[in-house]
Amino acid sequence: MAYAPKDLSVLAYANSFTLWHYATQHDLTQVDEPSYFDGASDALRIGDQITINASGRNTFRFVEAVDSRAGTVRIGKPEA
């Protein structure tokens, strides 16, 4: 199963920062796969935050790297 663009929406935008919301029935382990959000490489920017609801679990991730030419996105977990 892959990222679904219809499930990603903007919650807030200010000063080149976007807070996103993503809801999916996928397990969080699937969402954390390295290439999961590659389909959003044209929308996501470094520093953006994604609030994720995955199979009933709620968490958030940060966009660490985007290469829109290669179509790749790297998502990072918050530091403990």
Image: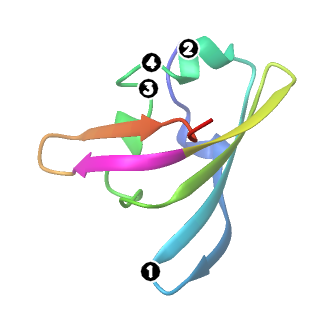
- Numbered circle sitting on residue 7: none
Crowd tier of the residue under label 3, counting other residues whose Cα lies within 10 Å: few below 14, some 14–19, many 20 or above: some
| Disc 4 residue type (three-letter) | Glu
Q: Earlier in the sequence, mark 1 or mark 2?
A: 1
* Magenta stretch secondary structure, dominant: strand
Contact check, label 2 and label 4, Cβ < 8 Å? yes
Residue at label 4? Answer: 33
Identify the residue at image location x=63%, y=57%.
20
Front position among marks 4 and 3: 4
Contact check, label 4 and label 3, Cβ < 8 Å? yes
Decide if residue 79 is on the left or right side of residue 44: right
9 within the magenta span: no
Contact check, label 1 and label 3, Cβ < 8 Å? no
| Disc 2 residue type (three-letter) | Gln
Report helix, strand or loop for mark 2.
Answer: helix
Report helix, strand or loop for mark 4.
Answer: loop
Residue at label 1? Answer: 16
Q: Position of residue 18 (x, y in %)?
A: 55, 69
Q: Earlier in the sequence, mark 3 or mark 2?
A: 2
Q: Which residue of the protein is positioned furthest toward the left in this rendering?
A: 69
Identify the residue at image location x=13%, y=40%.
70
Identify the residue at image location x=20%, y=51%.
68
Residue at label 2? Answer: 30
Contact check, label 4 and label 1, Cβ < 8 Å? no
